[in-house]
Amino acid sequence: MKNCKGIFVGFALLIAISSCGERDVEGELRDHIAENARYDVNQFVLEKLEQNRIVMLADAGHGVRLYLQSVIGILNHWLDTNIARAGSGDPICRNVILVLELDSLWVEAVEEYGESNDPDDVLYIGHLATEIFTTAKLEFYLDLGDLRRRIDEYNQSCSQDQPLNLSLFGPEKPIDMDNWSAEKREQFFVYERDEYSSQRLTAHLEQHPESRALVFYGNAH
């Protein structure tokens, strides 16, 4: 039955094309393919970032390489697009803040690791004790360091009046749950955590009005 359905759809398409008569069959087929083609996700996100101050990306599993590398792909596309436009005087989102589901101490460690390539900067017991810390995250943090070095190289080679900037921001609240009761955990994670992080991000953007925020969080948020 599946094969019959495929034949019927194909036959219907042929009938539709053959009925075009003297119209631009090739052009109409090209338009049809373009309308149903897959989006360029990197370009799609970049366009949304141009139009909005905050664009949020969500993963469906912490520490999964697919989602982490998607973020790297988007940021590399942002940089590549600006490199291609170099000299045009029309940069895209010169200042991007990558907002990660981390606290300020985590972000500081990630930045140090990106510069030193020394795993000791991020491999301490508070991080290793969580099941969401994976080797894919180490790769992600290294890639962020490489990306920021590419940005520095670009800024050194182009006009300094329009440099690009990628900064990291972690709005999470540093906490120590060792002595927390079940009730306190529930109160924080259900009622307080997201509100706290949202307020921190709002305040950060108010301090940086020229910046756009690319937020990468778990889909539960």
Image (cartoon, rainbow, N blue to C red):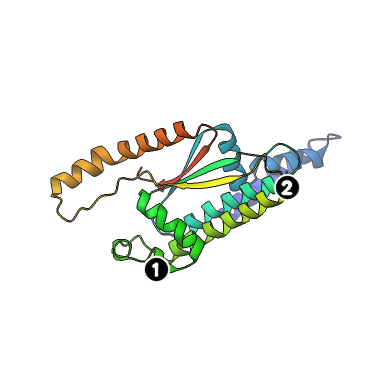
With respect to residue 55, does 216 lie above or below?
Answer: below
Q: Decide if residue 185 is in sight here.
A: yes
Q: Nearer the viewer, mark 2 or mark 1?
A: 1
Type of residue at label 2?
A: Ala
Residue on which the image places disc 1: 120
Residue on which the image places disc 2: 84
> Splitting the image into 4 quarters, where does residue 45 fall?
top right
Toward the viewer: 35 or 132?
Answer: 132
Q: Determine crowd level at label 1: few under 14, some 14-19, many 20+ residues with C-alpha closer than 10 A.
A: few
Q: Position of residue 161 (x, y in %)?
A: 67, 39
Toward the viewer: 7 or 192?
Answer: 192
Instruction: Identify the residue at horizontal 53%, vertical 58% (top origin).
Output: 145
Q: Decide if residue 102 is in sight here.
A: no
The residue positioned farthest toward the right in the image shown: 22
Q: Position of residue 134 (x, y in %)?
A: 39, 64
Type of residue at label 1?
A: Asp
Instruction: Identify the residue at horizontal 31%, vertical 38% (top origin).
Output: 196
Q: Earlier in the sequence, mark 2 or mark 1?
A: 2
